[in-house]
Amino acid sequence: MNITFLIGNGFDLNLDLQTQYESFLKKYTATEDPDNQLLTNFKKQILEEADLWSNAEMAFGNYTQKMVGNNNNAEDFCICHEDFCEKLANYLDEQEAQIDFSALKAEIGASFAQSIAFQNIIKGFREESRTQLKDAASNFSDGYNYNFISFNYTKTLDKCIDCIRSRPALLGRRTHRNVAYDNSIGKLYHVHGYTDSDMVLGVNDESQISVPELFDGFGPEYKNQLIKQQTNKMNEQGIDKKVHSLIRNSDLLYIYGMSIGETDALWWKRIASAMKNSGNLHLIIHCYAAPPEGLIRRKYQTFSTVQKEHFLSFSDLPSNEKTMLMDRIHIDNSNIFALLRDTVTQRLISDEELQQMSDEELRALAKL
């Protein structure tokens, strides 16, 4: 049974890393560029529209309008975009270095394996949803194969997985009809690249660019730098096709730490299409901001319905087919990675400790 996790920035935030755009922007805009008026103006604009830039991907689509108003061109835009990405990558590397994976390898491996286990995934649901998910799993007579699609630039997820690869027994075995099957780690893809290569930061499609005419007269690579699917094509790693194939071949999808937003609309549309084509495919969406269930469940039920409808709004399926998918979308208000968080946060390296480390020690941490 292929269980695939789609992992967003909430995974790193859960580990107490300050990886949200708001934290990065404070540092980025505090750095002066006395010899570069273009970047100085860019950072000034960010400060003036701080709320907008909390979603930097959409903000870049809107920033094309500011560029035109300031008589800048596509080259200027790409310089600002590249500087932003380079500084963001450096910032995220610093955050990631706070976790000493070498000292915590055994503990992280054990807690991560428990976190992704099928029984832990369904533990937070009530009886009817648990039974529904168990019944769906009963159609597969093999072990649980855990796959991952990371939307993060960091390698925290990769390092957690590496802590298991050397000790696969941590994943346990699944017994189905009196036959025991080994559980396993499957594929891992970074759909938006890494901090050191193939970084993808932008919008879902051209409709999210306020003034696409900014790129007129320039090569297609200028505009493609801002459109995610086109950026992945430029990176020539085939990542779009690989991830799409993995989604189509999954039997359970779990979205964790991601907002279901416009800049990743392509993937929500593809998931809905995969669910339509596979009547046994279920989707779980972790919602950090879900209300408490309370004595009466009306508010929670309303919240769940709104979340499901919002997800399906990105699909072009007819309304009757969307309705049919509603029962196979499950909203999870528990934190399946709570144990991993507790394991990691007890031993985070502080910024002060990082500053005292030598360059060799820092490089060693980054390579773990």
Image (cartoon, rainbow, N blue to C red):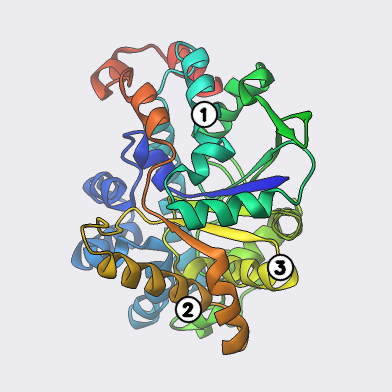
- How far from the left and from the top, in percent, is residue 20? 33, 48
Location of residue 161 (image quadrant):
top right
> What kind of element bears circle 2?
loop
- How far from the left and from the top, in percent, is residue 332? 42, 54
Q: Which numbered disc covers residue 279? A: 3
- How far from the left and from the top, in percent, is residue 130? 52, 51
From this viewpoint, is residue 153 visible?
Answer: no
Which residue, given by chain and number where applicable, does mark 1 sit on? Answer: 114
In the rendered view, tell whether residue 329 sits above or below residue 250. Answer: below
The amino acid type found where label 1 is placed reads Gln
Calculate the distance from the C-alpha at mark 1 to the C-alpha at mark 3.
Answer: 28 Å
Instruction: Name the one closer to the observer, 22 or 308.
Output: 308
Look at discs 2 and 3 and give the one toward the viewer.
Answer: 3
- How far from the left and from the top, in percent, is residue 232? 66, 58
Which residue, given by chain and number where applicable, does mark 2 sit on? Answer: 209
Q: Residue at x 30, y 60 (%)?
A: 54
